[in-house]
Structure formats: C-alpha cells, structure tokens
C-alpha cells in the first residue's frame, strides 16, 4: 500500500515542481537572466518566492516527518506512513498556484528559456540522485525511509528559486559561447556594408523615442532600418544585424542601452556608428551604476568609440551632457531649447495643446521652419531636435525635416495621447518612468486647463539610494497638479503618499490599490467626461505586491 501512495506522491511532486519552476523561469526572464537581479527580486519579494501558505506547509511537513519517524520507531506500523503520505500529498497539492494574476509580459519560451528550463531540471535530477545516495547509506526501512525521502523532495520544492540560480550558472558557458558566435557574426557582417550610415543613440532616457523619431525623419530621404522596440543590448542588436540588415538599407539607427560601465563600449564596437547621439543623463539604474558620474562615463563611451571623422550630437539642455560636450573635440552638433546662441539646432515658440505641439525649428545659419507634431511634452521636443540634428548631419533640409516631424507617431507608452471616444483624455506614459520624465508628464497634463486631472502610478524604481526622496518629490509635484491620485502598491508608494501629505493633500483624494486591474476599477468609479488621466509608469510583473 505504501508503494502506491509513494507513486502518487511522486506524481504530485513532479507536477508541483514543474509549475513552481515555470514561475521562476518567468521571473528570471523578466530580470534579463541576470542572477544578481533575480537574487535581489527574491530578497525584496520573498513573500512571492516563498508564500506564507507554502511556508506553513513546508514547516508543517518537517514537524510531521519528525512525529512520523518517532511513531515508526516506537511502533513499526505502515498506517503511520500512509497517514503521513496522505497529509503530504494534500499539503503539496494545496501549495500549487494554478491561478495567478494575468501577466503584463507573459513567459516566452525562447531557445534560451528552454535551455535554462532544461538545465533547471538537470539540477533537480542531480539533487534527487544525491537524495537517493543519502538514503542508500541509511539502514533501509520503508516505513521511515519514505517520509524522509518526501521531506527531502519538499526541501527541493521549497528552495526551487535557488535551483534556478544554480541552473543559470550551469548553462552560462553555453550561453556565452552562443552569444559570442552571433556577436562575431554580426560584427563581421555590418563591416561589409561600406556605404551604410550608422547612427548610435544612447541616454538615461529618451533613447527609444529618439530612435523612432530619427528613423521617421530620415525616411524623407533614405531607406532606414532601426532596432525594434527596446532592442538595445549586444544580443538584441546582433539579432537585427544578422536577420534584418541588407544592402537595400542606407541608414541603420541603433539604440544602445547600459546597466554597467563598459556596456555602451561593447555595443558601439559591434555597431560601429559614425554618428553618436547623447539624449540625456540622469539618475536611472543607480542600483548598478552607483552614481551619476559612472552613468556619464558609460554614455560617453559612444562618443569615444566614434571614428575621428565621426559626428557627436549632444542635448545641451542637460547639465551632465553639457559637461561631456564641452570636453569633446570631435565634430559636434549641439541641440536644445536653452542658451540658443550656443546651439546648432534649437526650438522656439513652443505651444502644447490636447492635439499635439507646435514650435519653430531653427539652425545656427539663421534658417527656420514651423513644425507640427502629435507629440506632447518638452522632453519630446528635445527628442525631435535630436532627430533633426541627425537629419541635418545627413543632408536633409529644414523643410524635409519638418515634413518628417509631422509624420512622427507617438511611441507607445511614452507620453502617448489616447482619446478613447468617451470625452476622457488619456495620456499613457507607462514606460519606465524617471524623475525628469515624470515631471515632464505632469507639466503636460497641467497644460489642460479647466479639467480634472487624475494620475495612476506605482512610482519609480531603480533609483538606488535616491529612490525614496525622488518618489517623495514626485508626490509633492503631483499634489500641485492632480485632483485625484491612484497609487499602485501600498509599500512601494509610501514615499509618494508622504510627499502628498506633506503638501496637505487630502487623504480622501488618494486611493491605494494592489494591482493595475484594481486601479482600473477605481478609475472607472472616479472618471467622467472632460477628465485627463495620466498613467505614469507600469512596473514589470516582478514588482507586483
């Protein structure tokens, strides 16, 4: 009889470990397969890695195992083993989470994910073999050997997130070899396109929008390939070069991202740009960079990797980039909206409405043209100026640039104006908020006079030691603009709440919810025609409380 229940127990266990492993595969994928990021997630969200119910079950199994073995030593009766197994099966089955909140970004079973998943089960099999070896060393008595075996399997199940880390270490040499193959292939391929004009774009923020803007403007004269979405890593860019780049393209626009010193250098050496654009430097990814000086150094790697005849393009409105521009002796183009006498490309007479923005585009030679755009926000005008600077460097006239600017569509989730036909204006700025972007978004909705303003936000992340104060300041700024506030995540939004209350903002106008779905329900209760709603930031599933 015990053997039958053991078989059932093993079946339940394999089913449970599969589901738990799949969940952690999803989380480590969101964290970019980086063990340090995943370990940080485990520590910060331990209640998700080790739910309260699972803790009770696991420690209950430990107690039950001790009691069962003592009972079996006193009276060797199979009934104790069977009762234990029934309790164990019930506990493990009850711990399986069949239903989770709908993910914002679903698990994608890429080849890399499949390799890691397989590696994870190799780790589990090795652990099972170790358990079998340990049990073989003990005097065999199935009545207590079975409970002991199930306890050890429970331990594997409970500590599964650490198995995923071990699996990632195990598969790392394979991934490194695969990555090198595709990197080298892309490195060699792109150098065969002798006439290809390559533009590299980097910055703490604004780089994705600037990439889309630049590509759209350049299409007035050239056939343009750009890296899609937020492809900005060596592997993402290698994939685009290997799969999409052909000799039909005249310009290749490459977004370059970084979380550590040296990242931009690696990407720039791969893409080999002749034009480099620095959009902004600010306090983002401080958990890895530690300080703004390291961010400046990393972003400047793009300029250092340009050839002697290369062109460096700088957002001169940004105080950090201004320092980098002033020390640069390569050919450079300065753009912005301040200190216009020092600039090569600049905007004046900016006007923002619910339909978009208008401004005058000027160059150093005294030429100017009126531009219309669907984009909102001062920082989006700066991104348009970056695109205009690249276009001018590549021979487009101001008139061609203005035509391109008018064709630029809002990048999804980046101050995107949405009119759902209900009389409510929705501004979607849900992608990767930062202090500068969040303030710009508030400035935009403040332009909508005589309308109620509602913000939905979980706050900002990855700001290191500055995160609390930055979110508190964000709360103070919200208090000056918004009529209602919906905060997502009680713990994460505490500093925003504090900032609001310091400005004597009414508690009755602050609503704290746990998820975006709950925020949407609350919003439907509040909103009415004529309102303006700002969605500021949307954190990945790993941040769900």
Image (cartoon, rainbow, N blue to C red):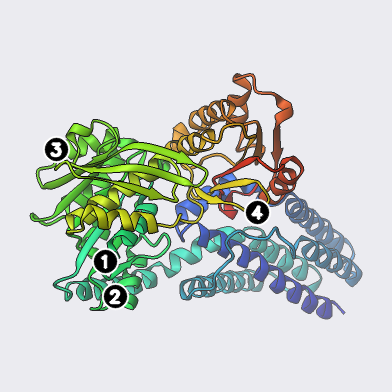
Judge by depth and name the residue closer to the eye, 225 or 219.
219
Q: Secondary structure at mark 3?
A: loop
Q: Which residue is mark 1?
A: 252
Q: Which residue is mark 4?
A: 421
Judge by depth and name the residue closer to the eye, 202 or 269.
202
Q: Secondary structure at mark 4?
A: loop
Q: Secondary structure at mark 2?
A: loop
Residue 393 lies, in percent from the top left, at 17, 54
In the depicted structure, whether residue 498 falls above or below residue 205: above
Residue drawn at the location 67% of the way across and 68% of the way down: 19
N-terminal-most mark, 3 or 1: 1
Judge by depth and name the residue closer to the eye, 113 or 353.
353
Residue 264 visible in the picture: yes
Q: Which residue is mark 2?
A: 245
Q: Give the class, few, some or many, for how many residues have Cα within 10 Å of label 2's Cα (few <14, many ≥20).
A: some
Q: Which residue is mark 3?
A: 327
| Mark 1 vs mark 4, CA separation in Å | 38 Å
Residue drawn at the location 20% of the way across and 55% of the way down: 397
Check if mark 2's residue and mark 4's residue have beta carbons within 8 Å.
Answer: no
N-terminal-most mark, 3 or 2: 2
**Quadrant in which the N terminus appears:** bottom right
| Mark 1 vs mark 2, CA separation in Å | 8 Å
Which mark is in front, 3 or 1? 1
| Mark 4 vs mark 3, CA separation in Å | 50 Å
Q: How many marks?
A: 4
Judge by depth and name the residue closer to the eye, 196 or 222.
222
Which mark is in front, 3 or 2? 2
Is residue 344 toward the left or the right of residue 149 in the image? Answer: left
Q: Give the class, few, some or many, for how many residues have Cα within 10 Å of label 1's Cα (few <14, many ≥20).
A: many
Is residue 236 toward the left or the right of residue 484 in the image? Answer: left
Is residue 252 toward the left or the right of residue 433 in the image? Answer: left
N-terminal-most mark, 4 or 3: 3
């Amino acid at each position: 009889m015990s053997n039958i229940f053991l078989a059932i127990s093993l079946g339940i266990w394999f089913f449970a470990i599969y589901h738990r492993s799949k969940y952690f595969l999803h989380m480590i994928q969101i964290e970019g397969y980086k063990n340090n990021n995943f370990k940080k997630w485990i520590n910060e969200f331990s209640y998700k890695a080790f739910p309260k119910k699972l803790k009770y079950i696991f420690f209950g199994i430990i107690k039950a195992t001790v009691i069962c073995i003592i009972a079996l030593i006193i009276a060797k009766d199979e009934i104790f083993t069977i009762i234990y197994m029934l309790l164990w099966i019930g506990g493990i089955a009850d711990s399986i989470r069949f239903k989770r909140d709908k993910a914002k970004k679903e698990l994608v079973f890429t080849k890399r994910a499949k390799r890691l998943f397989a590696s994870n089960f190799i780790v589990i099999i090795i652990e099972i073999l170790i358990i079998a070896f340990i049990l073989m060393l003990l005097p065999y008595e199935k009545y207590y050997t079975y409970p002991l075996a199930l306890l050890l399997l429970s331990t594997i199940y409970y500590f599964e997130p650490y198995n995923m880390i071990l699996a990632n270490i195990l598969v790392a040499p394979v991934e490194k070899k695969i990555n090198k193959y595709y990197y080298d292939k892309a490195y060699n391929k792109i150098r065969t396109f002798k006439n290809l004009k390559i533009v590299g774009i980097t910055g703490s923020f604004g780089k994705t929008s600037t990439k889309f803007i630049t590509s759209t403007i350049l299409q007035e004269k050239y056939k343009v390939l750009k890296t899609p979405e937020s492809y900005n890593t060596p592997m993402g860019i290698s994939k685009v070069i290997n799969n999409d780049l052909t000799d039909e393209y005249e310009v290749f626009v490459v977004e370059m991202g970084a979380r550590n010193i040296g990242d931009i250098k690696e990407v720039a050496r791969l893409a080999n740009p002749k034009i480099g654009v620095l959009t902004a430097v600010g306090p983002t990814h401080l958990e890895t960079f530690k300080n703004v000086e390291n961010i400046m150094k990393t972003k400047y790697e793009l300029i250092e990797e340009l050839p002697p005849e290369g062109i460096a393009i700088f957002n001169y409105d940004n105080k950090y980039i201004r320092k980098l521009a002033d020390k640069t002796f390569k050919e450079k183009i300065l753009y912005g909206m301040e200190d216009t006498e020092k600039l090569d490309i600049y905007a004046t007479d900016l006007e923002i409405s619910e339909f978009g923005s208008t401004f005058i585009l000027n160059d150093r030679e005294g030429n100017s043209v009126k531009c219309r755009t669907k984009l909102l926000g001062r920082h989006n005008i700066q991104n348009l100026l970056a695109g205009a600077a690249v276009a001018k460097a590549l021979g487009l006239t101001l008139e061609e640039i203005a035509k391109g600017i008018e064709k630029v569509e809002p990048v999804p989730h980046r101050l995107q104006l949405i009119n759902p036909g209900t009389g409510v204006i929705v501004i979607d700025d849900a992608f990767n908020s930062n202090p500068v972007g969040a303030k710009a978004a508030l400035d935009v909705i403040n332009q909508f006079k005589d309308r109620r303003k509602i913000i939905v936000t979980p706050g900002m992340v990855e700001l290191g030691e500055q995160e609390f104060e930055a979110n508190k300041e964000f709360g103070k700024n919200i208090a000056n603009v918004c009529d209602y506030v919906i905060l997502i995540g009680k713990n994460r939004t505490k500093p925003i709440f504090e900032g609001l209350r310091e400005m004597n903002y009414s508690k009755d106008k602050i609503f704290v919810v746990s998820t975006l779905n709950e925020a949407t329900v609350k919003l439907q209760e509040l909103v009415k025609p004529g309102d303006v709603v700002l969605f500021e930031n949307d954190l990945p599933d790993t941040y769900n409380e």
